[in-house]
Amino acid sequence: MLERLFDQYPLAAMLEALINASEPQSGWWVLDSTTQILFQTVDRKPPTDAHDWELKAGQYVGRLVTARDYPKVRALGDVMAQMLTILLQNEAQRIAEESERLAAQQEGQIHQRLSQQFATLYKRGEVTRLALEESVALLGAGGSIIYTKSSEEVFRLAGYSGTIPYGMTPDPELRRGLLYHVAQTQDTVWLNVIERGSGATATEQRARNILAIPLRLQSACVGVIALFNRLDGFSSRHVRLLQIMATHAAVAYHHAGRYRHLVAQGETDSDWQEVFEHNELDWKELRD
């Protein structure tokens, strides 16, 4: 970041002007975190016993060094270090805001694409397939699994994909473990290290990491989706992306259930789709 500042702004000229106006005979250097010299007033390396100021923007990014050490030089160093620190903090803030803008733009595009994809699905199996595929692709997880609530008020296996800790024979019904906890409490489980005291079963403890959230339709939990074994672990952004996908999947399960009910009654020629809409508050909660 410090090198970028020197590329974007005339920092060398600014520092030279301050030095020439105050202590033109003093030697100064600006080094980045790898000790690469970005600015110097004398053609030699800084002495090992030099006086210096750390430059930080949330973390250490470099230092300002002077060869001399007396009050007037220290005062000049304080001014230059403060100026560089302010510029670094402003740049860090600008980068963070730009990253947030790009992330929000990407999430909006994902939201629009998923709304179109899930809106055309009328069968629960199709909803499950798409939800599994999209969750793994969006978050880069090793595998995923979905349980959905049946008419008997129990959560039954809907499908799974990729590498999951349950092997090739996941339990057909949720009775315990982290996913059962999500189904019962509608809490999110986000663990990059699964420990014995986490409530995970011995089988779930085989996973490298887990992100599990409820498939929620307003206040009702219609299912649970869990992702496992992401190489670098899950982040807060992955939680937001999965919540977006889960919201669309929950609505699609609702529509699929309505469609199946009408098929059984022979009413599919009518305007069968009872559209479920999330109000602006629901989407605001996802964005927050």
Image (cartoon, rainbow, N blue to C red):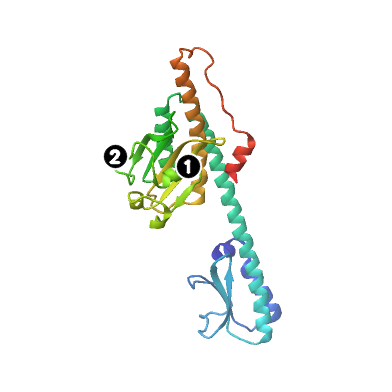
SS type, badge 2: loop
Of tags 1 and 2, the one toward the viewer is 1
User: Is residue 235 visible in this depiction of the protein?
Assistant: yes
Quadrant in the rendering for residue 145: top left
* Marked residue nearer the N-terminal end (1 or 2): 2
Query: Residue 169 shows which numbered tag?
Result: 2
Asked whether 73 or 280 is in front, the reply is: 280
Residue positioned 54% across, 38% down in the render: 109
Asked whether 38 or 90 is in front, the reply is: 90
Q: Position of residue 229 (x, y in %)?
A: 37, 49
Residue at the farthest bottom position: 70
SS type, badge 1: helix
Query: Residue 184 shows which numbered tag?
Result: 1
Q: Is residue 259 above or below residue 200?
A: above
Asked whether 276 or 195 is in front, the reply is: 195
Q: Position of residue 246 (x, y in %)?
A: 49, 38
Residue positioned 50% across, 44% down in the render: 185
Asked whether 17 or 257 is in front, the reply is: 257
Query: Is 170 on the left-hand or right-hand side of 254?
Result: left
Residue positioned 65% across, 87% down in the render: 70
Residue at the farthest right position: 21
Q: Position of residue 90 (x, y in %)?
A: 64, 61
Quadrant in the rendering for residue 173: top left
